[in-house]
Image (tube, rainbow, N blue to C red):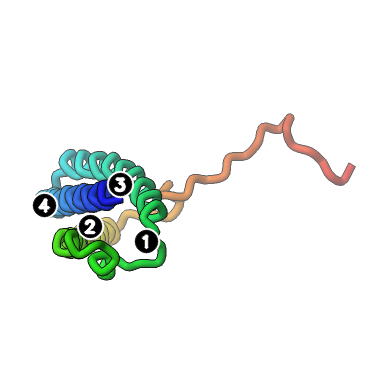
Amino acid sequence: MEQARQAYLSLLNELSGRLDQLSELARQKTQAVKKDDLTALDEALKQEQAMTLNLRGLEQKRLRAVSQLGLEGSSLSELASRYPDSMQIQARQTAEKLLRSYQEYRCATEVARNTLELNLHEIEKVIAASGVDTAGVPGYAAPVPEPPKRMKTDFRA
């Protein structure tokens, strides 16, 4: 059982490392937006997407480990109290590290999101100020295509 507990702490450390990497990517996105570097922004977004998929796999492993160790319903802050005395310090340090990594990730992504939104609003203002009519311009919502005439049905018949 001690080996399973140690493996769980290693998994939590790996999660913490991935969150740190995602935090760095969020900072890269912020810098790319500030520098108007769409290529760097696109690259950071691609890396972020790949890392997010990796995180999903780690989360599945974590859920299996939680079930195996009987830690369902326990919060991360309670982790150390659920471990034997010989491993409590390591469990507490691991949990604190993961919590710090998560908080840093949330802050970095919030800054990146706000920076992106601010720049998008600036772009919208410039477009509006230039007098360009954006009505009828394709945006995120694609127009519904009209089916070919031979596919139309006359329901009145």
At horizontal 29% and vertical 60% (from top left) the residue drawn is 128
Using the image, tell me which numbered label, if any, was put on residue 71: 1
Instruction: Pick whichever of labels 3 and 2 is earlier in the sequence.
Output: 3
Judge whether 129 appears above or below 59 on screen. below
Residue in the image at 73% along x and 30% along y: 150
Residue where numbered disc 2 is placed: 116
Q: Nearer the viewer, mark 1 or mark 3?
A: 1
Identify the image quadrant of residue 133. bottom left
Q: Mark 1 touching mark 3, by CB under 8 A?
A: no
* Helix, strand or loop for disc 3: helix
Looking at the image, which residue is at 35% across and 67% down?
74
Residues at marks 1 and 2 touching, judged by CB atoms closer than 8 Å: no
- Which residue position holds label 4? 31
Amino acid at the residue labelled 4 = Gln
Callout 4: helix, strand or loop? Answer: helix
Q: Which mark is residue 55?
A: 3
In this picture, residue 137 sits left or right of residue 149: left
Q: Which image quarter is the C terminus in?
A: top right
Q: Given the image, on which type of amino acid does mark 2 rest?
A: Leu
Give residue 39's mark: none
Nearer-the-camera pick, 141 or 21: 21
- The first of marks 4 and 3 along the sequence is 4
List the single residue furthest toward the top. Answer: 150
